[in-house]
């Protein structure tokens, strides 16, 4: 199971979808991955950054498979994004992630553009920075990268040693932007020259001047995002590049939500417009505790609606309400144990709501606000016993 994060545009629909592949042994939360993805989102490009197998929060063991496994991870991420959110038009890869992006693009005809950042043209260049400890013919090899120790599969090193990135370049389905710092002391700028020379047009090269290999300065990450945002607009499909498109790429209409599966147990992905949240069950029930439970979400819905209603009412009435907090609990009780369940028999669903009001409010104002809490729209929906219809849908 691969773990990832989507950076969403703060306003409006995404003008495009992108995937960011992090550098060798880094992760989705590295400075470059985080800063560039967020900066692209600010420019309207929703960006998925994820951890390769065995790194960060992703499952598996790092280095158990060859370099091709990283490419397979990137292809799988692209297929997931296309199925659940929108077709990725842009692949970005940092360092060896850029090399993986070059290879993956050949398997993803929907990709319109690829950006490499400080990427090596050949895997042999990466091997210069890997110091194996022990016999590389063994199944597991201890390597030291930047002073850190990693156990990798011997086949990982063998695959790196065999692969020549220039072989994948003529197969690119779209445009290429090569970005590299002339002062990069980890991957020399001659590697960028090799990538650029081997690629077919359309292609572009942009120097990152004195940026370091990890793009540790915020200004360098912002510069990359600015250039990429302007450059890629030329290669995006017209309906995606247009601002304020009327049709959402995910097919959801206003007021609709979408729920899909992360796994075949309890972990679910949910989306409402550009907002995304996961749901799960706790570990003691067989889940992974990677998000609120369905009942947690129900209580959050009622609580948020209650809070919003009280705030709007207090402002309209001029009440000195400084802060409002709502605490809720759901439980199944017997009607005889419930003081508010007159006329009910057997077991009932009980939602307890505590309203905490802060401010120099009079007792009459507090009681008035408590009365209004029962009038929030979600509360009324729940008490109105809504009619729920179901039908079969088709992909």
Image (cartoon, helix red, strand yellow):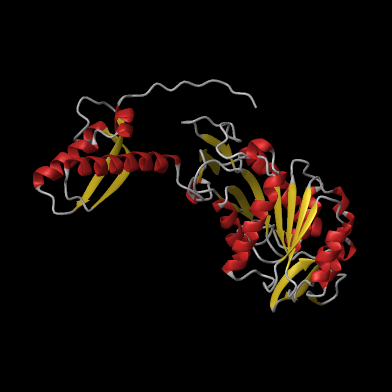
The residue lying toward the viewer, choosing from 60 and 21, is 21
Q: Position of residue 136 (x, y in %)?
A: 85, 72
- Compared to 321, does 393 lie above or below? above
The residue lying toward the viewer, choosing from 76 and 6, is 6
Q: Is residue 30 visible?
A: no
Specify the quadrant of the image occupied by residue 331.
top left
Instruction: Say left or right for 337 vs 259.
Output: left
Specify the quadrant of the image occupied by residue 315.
top left
Specify the quadrant of the image occupied by residue 29.
bottom right
Tell me how many marks there are: 0
Q: Residue at x 59, y 48 (%)?
A: 46
Q: Where the C terminus falls, by quadrant? A: top right
Q: Residue at x 45, y 46 (%)?
A: 292
Q: Position of residue 225 (x, y in %)?
A: 62, 58
The residue lying toward the viewer, choosing from 354 and 101, is 101
Instruction: Say left or right for 110 vs 38.
Output: right
The residue lying toward the viewer, choosing from 317 and 260, is 317
Q: Position of residue 98 (x, y in %)?
A: 75, 59
Q: Position of residue 20 (x, y in %)?
A: 66, 55
- Compared to 267, does 53 lie above or below? below
Instruction: Say left or right for 76 vs 32.
Output: right
Q: Is residue 236 visible?
A: yes
- Compared to 87, does 40 lie above or below? below
């Amino acid at each position: 199971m691969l773990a990832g994060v989507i950076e969403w545009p703060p306003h409006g629909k995404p003008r495009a979808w992108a995937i960011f592949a992090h550098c060798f042994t880094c992760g989705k939360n590295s400075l470059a991955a985080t800063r560039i993805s967020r900066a692209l989102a600010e420019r309207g490009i929703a960006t998925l950054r994820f951890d390769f197998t065995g790194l960060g929060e992703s499952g598996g063991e790092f280095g158990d498979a060859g370099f091709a496994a990283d490419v397979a991870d990137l292809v799988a991420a692209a297929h997931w994004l296309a199925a659940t959110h929108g077709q990725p038009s842009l692949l970005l890869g940092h360092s060896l992630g850029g090399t993986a992006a070059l290879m993956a693009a050949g398997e993803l005809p929907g990709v319109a553009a690829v950006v490499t950042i400080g990427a090596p043209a050949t895997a042999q260049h990466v091997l210069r920075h890997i110091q194996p400890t022990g016999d590389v013919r063994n199944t597991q090899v201890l390597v030291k990268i930047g002073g850190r120790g990693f156990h990798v599969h011997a086949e990982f090193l063998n695959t790196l040693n065999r692969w020549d990135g220039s072989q994948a370049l003529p197969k690119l389905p779209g445009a290429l932007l090569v970005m590299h710092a002339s002062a990069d002391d980890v991957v020399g700028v001659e590697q960028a020259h090799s990538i650029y020379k081997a690629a077919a047009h359309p292609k572009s090269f942009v120097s990152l001047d004195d940026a370091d290999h990890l793009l540790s300065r915020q200004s360098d990450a912002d510069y990359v995002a600015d250039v990429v945002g302007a450059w890629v607009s030329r290669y995006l499909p017209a309906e995606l590049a247009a601002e304020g498109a009327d049709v959402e790429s995910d097919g959801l209409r206003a007021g609709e939500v979408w729920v899909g599966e992360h796994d075949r147990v309890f972990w679910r992905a949910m989306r409402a417009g550009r907002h995304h949240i996961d749901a799960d069950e706790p570990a003691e029930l067989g889940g992974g505790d990677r998000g609120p439970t369905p009942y947690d979400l129900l209580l959050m819905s009622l609580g948020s609606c209650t809070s919003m209603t009280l705030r709007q009412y207090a402002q309209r009435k001029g009440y000195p309400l400084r802060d409002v907090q709502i605490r809720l609990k759901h439980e199944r009780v017997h009607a005889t144990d419930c003081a508010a369940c007159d006329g009910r028999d057997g077991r009932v669903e009980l939602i307890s709501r505590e309203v905490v009001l802060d401010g120099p409010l009079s007792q009459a104002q507090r009681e008035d606000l408590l009365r209004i809490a029962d009038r929030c729209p979600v509360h009324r929906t729940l008490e109105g016993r809504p009619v729920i219809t179901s039908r079969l849908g088709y992909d």
